[in-house]
Amino acid sequence: MPGGNDAFQYARGRTEEDGALGVFRRKASERGTYGGWRWETDANKVGGAAPAPAATNEPRHVKEMREKLGTLVAALPPEVRPIITHNYSGPSTGLIGVARRAQIRSTEIPATLESKGFTQKQWDEVLADLKEKVTGTRTEGVQAQIDKGTTVSEMLDYLIANSEPRMGKLAAALKRFGAGNPALDLPYTNLKNPPKRQRGGTRAWEGSGEITDVLNAKGVADEITTLHEITHALTLSWFYTADKKSPLYKELVQMHKDARNQWLSENPGKTAKQAGDAVRGLADICLLYTSPSPRDRTRSRMPSSA
């Protein structure tokens, strides 16, 4: 949308196909050429009116926090800083890890923000908004499914229909893979009194591999956790009943051993238990890491922070 004055010419456009809509300017002397366009931050100069604001998933209070902090944003803990500095008009994928860790490890307002007059209530609202606006970290939808008594199969249907496309495809693939598996008919339920950093879990009878429970920790288990636990449910039954001499079983066990040994070589002084925890997510090899359920020594319990 062209516009301008004696010194400059302004236009609204995109830097690439499907890119962000921006406002650009060039010198009036460059009119009639194809070059000279530069990003213009003052959107009000286009045709005398500001363009419509870009859609944003920015959580409440973040803009105000960013403005009040100014250069003090560098004093925020590294695990929190991206929440304030991220450009929320763009993709949210870079915030997935930050948003997930924040729900468990950064629940207390950082001192730097508190020094600028922000409250714990405002920080709680930031985190609540964050987890519902970042890809894969939403918790309310999956919890609503559990509250209405959904099955594992129905939870996959929910993820197929409501999660972002990549996760939806994974959920659809899991449903095809698990066709006929009785675990799909189990109710998806909540963990009772989960440890602070545990997001979910899956339980099965050892020997038979029969899945007995697929669980989320209410309030912190998100779409990623839910997909993760369903993956456990559909693979544990195979793992417990697999022929220990089969090439696939041997390959999975060897992968886990190799990953553990590699981790130990890179982290001198660490224990084998710490190595097991660190590498249990390898190719969903965490199904190899088990601990007996305190209430039933014949059951295997999959604690998960995923």
Image (spheres, rainbow, N blue to C red):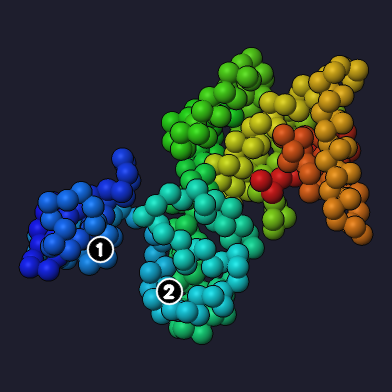
| Label 1 Cα neighbours within 10 Å, binned few <14 / some 14-19 / many ≥20 | some
Q: Could you tell me residue 46's position as x and y percent?
A: 14, 60
Using residue 211 as the reference point, say whether residue 158 is left or right of it. Answer: left
CA gap, disc 1 to disc 2?
Answer: 25 Å
Using residue 45 as the reference point, say whether residue 142 is left or right of it. Answer: right
Using residue 204 as the reference point, say whether residue 161 is left or right of it. Answer: left
Instruction: Say which of marks 1 and 2 sits in front.
Output: 1
In this rendered view, identify the residue nearer to me: 59 or 20: 20
Residue drawn at x 46%, y 33% is: 165
Residue drawn at x 27%, y 65% is: 41
Residue type (three-letter) at the residue carrying disc 2: Met
Marker disc for residue 40: 1
Residue drawn at x 60%, y 36% is: 227
Q: Could you tell me residue 78's position as x and y percent?
A: 60, 68
Label 2: which residue?
65
Q: Could you tell me residue 16's position as x and y percent?
A: 32, 44
